[in-house]
């Protein structure tokens, strides 16, 4: 990686030299004040990436004029949760007369070069420029890439397992796992199978952790199927083909789509809920109420999470309020026909 002439941390002047522009042009790039051509923006963004330049606190003081634009970097495939989250962000931004500039990266930490792709995406958002950045990520450690940028621009991360001091928001997937499992335990079930979500996702890990803790509290051994490679019904169906129907009377699936696929696989094997087993999902996606049977699930309000995240970032941008360290949307159990009391014997 190129460094400054003295081998020290790259400076704004180093960025200017490498991109063949003046230091004032680089300053305008970061502050959003004054004209910077598209060609110059591209060269500056490239120089920032090559040098690994990170602005210091003084750079933030240069930003005297807002653009009323917030950058959103969303990592991972689009699904019900991420789509609802973006909807909440968009609605709140519109109410505040802000625009969103959204970059969607369909990758996780197993994708080669994910850190470089994420850094490039942040550079693109800053080149627009934007007044703040929302990073929505299921990837453990991705928020650490924005630590330096947070000294120059307001940043908030949506993550189940934040690892930095950056302001964060998220759902409580651990509590969702505990709540779903406890519901089945209270119905008298002791042989409870967990169909886990994809191992690379923070949410999946937290829901499994909640399940395991609830089972341990009841003095029971956990039983987990790690067949899901994504959050889709196809993964749930695959897990259902591997499950032994004689080993469980209840199932906790890490999301509603996995539950849908699992129900279908069991139906193909002549096993039906709730007569043969009870089943719980997570999310409360709109179609869950119309599954056969209607699915008991743990509701996570992703749209409210998106709206509240924008409000917190907006408060930081306008300096209207202090932002709490971590805002959490708590889960809510929604009981429907897919769970019934276990009939002993």
Image (cartoon, grey):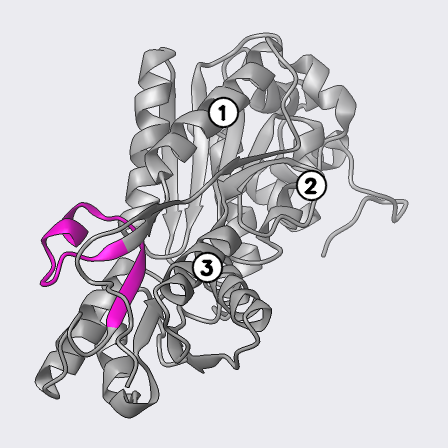
**Circle nearer the viewer, 3 or 2:** 3
In the rendered image, residue 21, in percent from the top left (x then y), is placed at 62, 28
Using the image as rendered, state which of residue 162 and residue 219 is in the foreground. 219
Q: Is residue 305 above or below residue 282?
A: above
Which part of the image, by quadrant, shows the N terminus?
bottom right
Q: Which residue is mark 1?
A: 129
Q: Which quadrant holds residue 261?
A: bottom left
Q: Is residue 42 visible?
A: no
In the rendered image, residue 213, in percent from the top left (x then y), is placed at 57, 66
Q: Secondary structure at mark 2?
A: loop
Q: CA distance from mark 3 to mark 2?
A: 30 Å
Q: 211 left or right of 261?
A: right
Q: Of callouts 1 and 2, which one flags the residue occurring earlier in the amino acid sequence?
A: 1
Q: Is residue 272 above or below residue 230?
A: below
Q: Is residue 30 above or below residue 33?
A: below
Q: Secondary structure at mark 3?
A: helix
Q: Residue at x 9, y 63 (%)?
A: 292
**Circle nearer the viewer, 1 or 3:** 3
Q: Residue at x 41, y 71 (%)?
A: 196
In the rendered image, residue 296, in percent from the top left (x then y), is placed at 25, 56
Q: Residues within 10 Å of mark 1 (few under 14, many from 20)?
A: many
The span shown in magenta is 278-296
Q: 321 left or right of 226?
A: right
Using the image as rendered, state which of residue 119 and residue 226 is in the foreground. 226
Q: Are marks 3 and 2 in contact (CB under 8 Å)?
A: no
């Amino acid at each position: 990686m190129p460094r400054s002439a003295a081998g020290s941390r790259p400076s704004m002047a180093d960025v200017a030299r490498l991109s063949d522009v003046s230091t004032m042009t680089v300053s305008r790039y970061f502050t959003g004040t004054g004209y910077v051509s598209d060609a110059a923006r591209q060269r500056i963004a490239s120089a920032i990436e090559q040098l690994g330049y990170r602005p210091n606190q003084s750079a933030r003081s240069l930003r005297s004029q807002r653009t009323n634009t917030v950058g959103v970097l969303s990592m991972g495939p689009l699904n019900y949760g991420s789509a609802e989250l973006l909807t909440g962000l968009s609605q709140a931004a519109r109410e505040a007369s802000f625009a969103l500039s959204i970059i969607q990266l369909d990758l996780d930490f197993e994708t080669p070069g994910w850190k470089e792709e994420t850094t490039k995406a942040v550079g693109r958002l800053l080149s627009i420029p934007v007044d703040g950045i929302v990073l929505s990520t299921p990837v453990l450690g991705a928020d650490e890439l924005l630590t330096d940028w947070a000294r120059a621009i307001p940043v908030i991360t949506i993550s189940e397992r934040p690892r930095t001091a950056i302001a964060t928001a998220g759902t409580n997937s651990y509590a969702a796992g505990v709540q779903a499992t406890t519901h089945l335990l209270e119905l008298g079930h002791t042989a409870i199978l967990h169909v886990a979500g994809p191992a690379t996702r923070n949410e999946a890990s937290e829901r499994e952790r909640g399940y395991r803790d609830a089972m341990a509290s009841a003095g029971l051994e956990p039983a987990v199927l790690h067949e899901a490679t994504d959050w889709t019904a196809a993964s749930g169906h695959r897990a259902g083909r591997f499950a032994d129907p004689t080993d469980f009377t209840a199932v906790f699936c890490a999301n509603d789509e996995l539950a849908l696929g699992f129900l279908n696989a069991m139906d193909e094997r002549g096993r039906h809920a709730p007569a043969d087993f009870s089943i719980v999902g997570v999310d409360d996606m709109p179609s869950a109420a119309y599954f056969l049977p209607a699915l008991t699930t743990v509701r996570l309000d992703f749209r409210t999470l998106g709206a509240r995240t924008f409000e917190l970032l907006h408060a930081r941008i306008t300096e209207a309020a202090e932002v709490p360290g971590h805002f959490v949307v708590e889960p809510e159990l929604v009981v429907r026909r897919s769970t019934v009391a276990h009939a002993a014997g």
